[in-house]
Amino acid sequence: MTKLCIILGDQLSETLSALSEINRHDDVVLMCEVKEEATYVSHHPKKIAFLFSAMRHFAQTLREKGYCVRYIKFDNPHNQGSLTKELIRAVEEIKPSAIILTEPGEWRVLKMFEELKKKLTVPLTIYEDNRFLCTTNEFKHWAEGKKQLRMEFFYRMMRQKHRILIDNHGKPIGGSWNYDAQNRNHAKHIHAFPERLEYPEDRITAEVISLVATHFSRHFGHLRPFTLAVTRQQALSEANYFIENCLVSFGDYQDAMLTNETTLYHSKLSFYLNAGLLLPKELCHMAEQAYLKQQAPLNSVEGFIRQILGWREYIRGIYWHFMPAYKEMNHFHATRDLPALFWGADTKMFCVKEVVRQTSVEAYSHHIQRLMITGNFALLAGINPQQVCDWYLAVYADAYEWVELPNTLGMALYADGGLMASKPYAASGKYIQRMSNFCKSCAYNPNDLLGEKACPFNSLYWNFLKQHEEKLKDNPRLHYAYMNWQKMDPDKKEGIHNKVQEVFAYLDSGRL
Ligand code: FAD
Ligand code: DLZ
Ligand code: SF4
């Protein structure tokens, strides 16, 4: 009575619920590299190489531990090209008595398996994903009856529930729940950041890199250099290295951006967390221990824990709470096509060019770059949310729809009309000038609104406020912005109107 357990590419955890339901000596684990998953958006080649290599290493670890693994490589001539077709083929060959799966991270994939379940004669059981700290039902329960689903209150509930950075009286350690106000320094004066670990290609990774070079050379982004961790052990080294060398300054410079410096003090652990090589709970405990041992200050430790225990879990809750309608939302009716500069076409806007360059090289950029450069530009320029989401889903190696969609559609584009964010993250060039050194290298001037060299973010910002005045003017967090807009001289308003036409004309003709 063999059971068949399918493990998806982002389920690479030995503690996965589905794995604990099978007997390693009698049952079979199925893993497959399939065209449908590798091409439903044109994923960055580094992302595909990372995932395939991590999947192959995980399969090897399972085999070493006595599991029987049926692993279908991408170039296997019998490969049927989709997860469900490969599952059907395995069922026909192995004739299992039951099929087991941990719930997929994406709506699309869950629906695929639910549809298949109706057709199969073998029972298929889907188990809860035990790697998250908040189940989808718990989130639903928390959300019930609430007018607003603000992350901050969810986060406080999670801190209490998991007793992380909580004192013996149930109060937050240090007296405050949140030290974000201390985490907004720029880093223009810092010239050296901690070196990062690099992992040499082993035989498995080299084989995968060659495969990706053959099949995905047309996808945007650099495959090499490839130095990512691809095993649990390596991912743990990354986590330890971050805690020992970077966490201390993580909080202070969380929002800073610099030319040629992708990571600063960020952890760059999202690739590993989202693929299952690291677990959120263990990272929260590691960070908490660093505070208790006085290796890192509270603003950094709390800030890091908030990202994982708060934001990451909250984002997942929002995704499952509002899907599938969420994906279609477009509060501002934004219709502009994604411009070619997102795919590396030349632009004089140095900030955008630099973030897209870093993304192309590393399949990574940090949160503020995603939110306040590319995201802010897409919001102000009125780019269609679904096209923007597909871009983010493709180009970042940590991108799976459950985490990418609410971050892009909700946080960056406010296309959900404020289900997540209390106001749109719209900003002019002045914000970018304050938080980065990008403007120093730019052809445009962040302090100019209407002149020949005026930063496009400035006129786009006022144009955005004007265009969406009806929807936004009563938002208390935009009170001052609208007060300034209303006080503005009519000639200046007309100047902005004309300038923004020029900006869009340049954008459309690839000259911005
Ligand atoms: P750090 O800054 O070191 O933070 C530590 C960890 O906290 C991260 O590894 C991540 O797991 C978690 N975290 C932090 N912020 C968030 C957040 N907003 N949502 C979920 N988890 C968070 N994150 C993804 O994992 N996948 C995505 O596809 C993704 N798309 C994004 C798209 C946009 C438009 C924006 C604004 C943000 C997106 N994020 C996404 C969130 C965030 O940018 C990344 O998690 C972060 O940049 C990963 O880098 P890091 O590991 O160095 O993070
Ligand atoms: C992102 C991705 C890619 C590129 N390739 C595969 C694959 O070949 N096999 C697989 O099992 N999963 C892959 N994934 C992850 C899935 O597309 C999907 O995002 C997750 O399983 C979440 O449901
Ligand atoms: Fe970006 Fe404007 Fe600064 Fe140029 S001047 S880097 S476009 S914010």
Image (cartoon, rainbow, N blue to C red):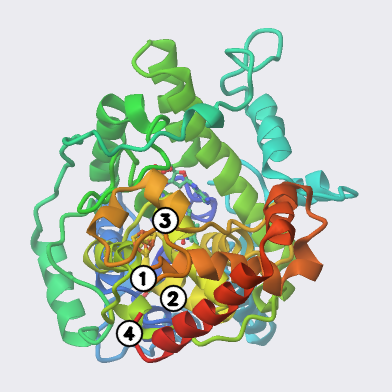
Residue 391 is tagged as 2
Determine the residue positioned at 32% across, 85% down: 511
CA distance separating discs 4 and 3: 21 Å
Q: Secondary structure at mark 1?
A: helix
Which is in the foreground here, disc 1 or disc 3? 3
Determine the residue positioned at 55% across, 26% down: 179
Residue 447 is tagged as 3
Query: Which residue is farthest top?
Result: 168
- At label 4, the amino acid type is Arg
Query: First in sequence: mark 1 or mark 3?
Result: 1
The residue nearer to you, when weighing 46 against 162, is 46
| Residue pointed to by mark 4 | 511
Query: First in sequence: mark 4 or mark 2?
Result: 2
CA distance separating discs 4 and 2: 21 Å
Query: First in sequence: mark 4 or mark 3?
Result: 3
- At label 2, the amino acid type is Trp
| Residue pointed to by mark 1 | 395
Residue density around tag 2, few if under 14, some if 14–19, many if 20 or more, within 10 Å: some
Q: Position of residue 183 (x, y in %)?
A: 47, 32
Ligand 3 is within 8 Å of the C-beta of the residue at disc 4: no
Left-right relation of 162 to 52: right
Q: Position of residue 26 (x, y in %)?
A: 42, 59
